[in-house]
Amino acid sequence: MSGHFDIVVIGGGPGGYVAALKAGQMGANVAIVEKEYLGGTCLNYGCIPSKALLASAELLHHVRHAADLGIEVAGQVSANWTQMQARKDKIVQTLRGGIKALLGARKVTIYFGRATLAGPGKITVDSNGKSDSFTASKTILAVGSVPSRIPGWPSDPNVVCTSDEALHWKTLPKKLLIVGGGAIGCEFACMLQPLGVEVTIVEMLPRLLPNMDGQLGDLLAKIFTKRGIKSFVGAKIGNLSINGNSARATMSDGTALEADRVLVATGRRPNTAEIGLSSVNLSVDRGFVRVNDRMETPVKDYYCIGDANGRCQLAHAASAQGVVAVENALGHGRAEDSAVPNCVYTFPEIASVGMTAEEARAAGRPVAIGFFPLSHLGKAMAVADNEGFVKVIRDRESGQFLGAHMIGHNVTECIAAATALLHQKASMADVAETIFAHPTISESLKEAAEDSMSIALHLPPRKMMRVAGGVA
């Protein structure tokens, strides 16, 4: 045994490293174990590398439409994938170093290797044939998730890939088939189409972004169609085969699709196998380690945060849960039940927080909907990005602000205002009475709030229509 720690965090992603930092800040003797790179999936295979590549693709998209703003771009405008990858890699490496420095400043002991629970309070770490062991008073599992693969499909990673491989491709395909129209699939479609890749998306459910407000996915599908991105929704691939360096997919209706590569973007599964859960009598539910609002597992002194607990597979949710887990582990009780925003970094961007109208009605809430199109907004016109809308949900009886759903320029920044107001349990009148700067995209939140109360000034008067469960 190499020692004892107050808290050991297993996993160095956005949940794990934030938990370790918080534990160090609170004076605990803490260690963190990471099997590969600090920053986990988010920094190395997800949030950050994808946004770096998306930024390049979006810039290229805007340059090609510069004439709309009176800017003439002479000569050929093209993308250099190799340089885009190099820029992305530099950003990732810089942030990895930053995390390591922060952990060092909090006197967090870092172990690199594969951690295994070896009985109550015991952890072993294996790395390059060497093994280390230590004990912990409290253990926080932050083991994250891995991309889901489809059983029975070809496994050649040169042709059938997940986001883990696709973000680090050395070359681009000419034709790409994306299986799954959620956030990952839509972001990759948006990223690669401006670079000359012919993109087709197949989504089994009735619309793109099926877990978000329906109007968001419907509008995104229309925008994709205008750009030449093909979307098949309510469709399922029955068979996938590889012939040399290409793939052939057959949909259930008999339609055949051919592509150089296939990106499987059907979600992620918890990375909880083979970490020794049985040695401490921890069980899983469909692979997830279930927890309460304090991030406590059913086994005393064990906590689980982030993707592995199944509550919300988003990096910022994992970070928030990490702080709560540490505070509870050190005797400062707090529950985590805050509203969590969800962002999709297509262009235009998409963001959502709180209830959809359908969720509110299912919960028995009488609903009023406010809607404001960005085509009416001065800032959106000024920057030539006026596709999109802001939609808000109000409880018609209590007046409570229940949710906001946005698609448009910079809405992943605007959603913070809606999230803060939801966190404070604001009424829709509070939102409508808040002064937003003009001209901004965020003022559309105020406009939509006013519309939900039938007091909008920048929309023509509308007739109230009675709909099932509410007013629209």
Image (spheres, rainbow, N blue to C red):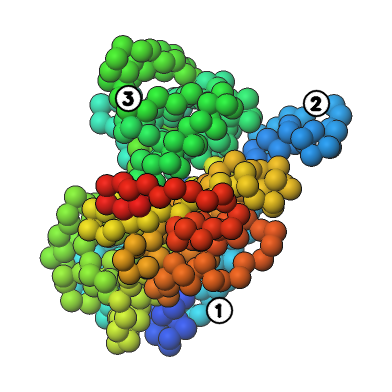
What is the C-alpha distance between the residues marked 2 and 3? 38 Å
- Furthest-left residue in this view: 281
* Residue drawn 51% across the image and 30% down it: 222
Compute the Cα span from label 1 to label 2: 48 Å
Q: Confirm or deny contact between disc 2 and disc 3 (CB under 8 A).
A: no
Q: Position of residue 324 (x, y in %)?
A: 35, 76
Dot 2 falls on a residue whose secondary structure is loop
Q: Amino acid at mark 3?
A: Ala
User: Disc number at residue 235?
Assistant: 3
The image quarter in which residue 53 lies = top right
Where residue 325 appears, as percent x and y from the top left, is 33, 75
Marks 3 & 1, CB-CB < 8 Å contact: no
Please, is residue 302 above or below residue 288 in the view?
A: below
Q: Residue at x 66, y 43 (%)?
A: 385
Neighbor class of circle 2 (other Cα within 10 Å; few <14, some 14-19, many 20+) is few
Please say if 74 is above or below 119: above
Q: Is residue 164 above or below residue 447?
A: above
Residue ID for mark 1: 105
Going from N to C along the chain, the mark reached first, 1 or 2, is: 2
Amino acid found under the numbered disc labelled 2: Gln
Tag 1 or tag 3, which sits nearer the N-term?
A: 1
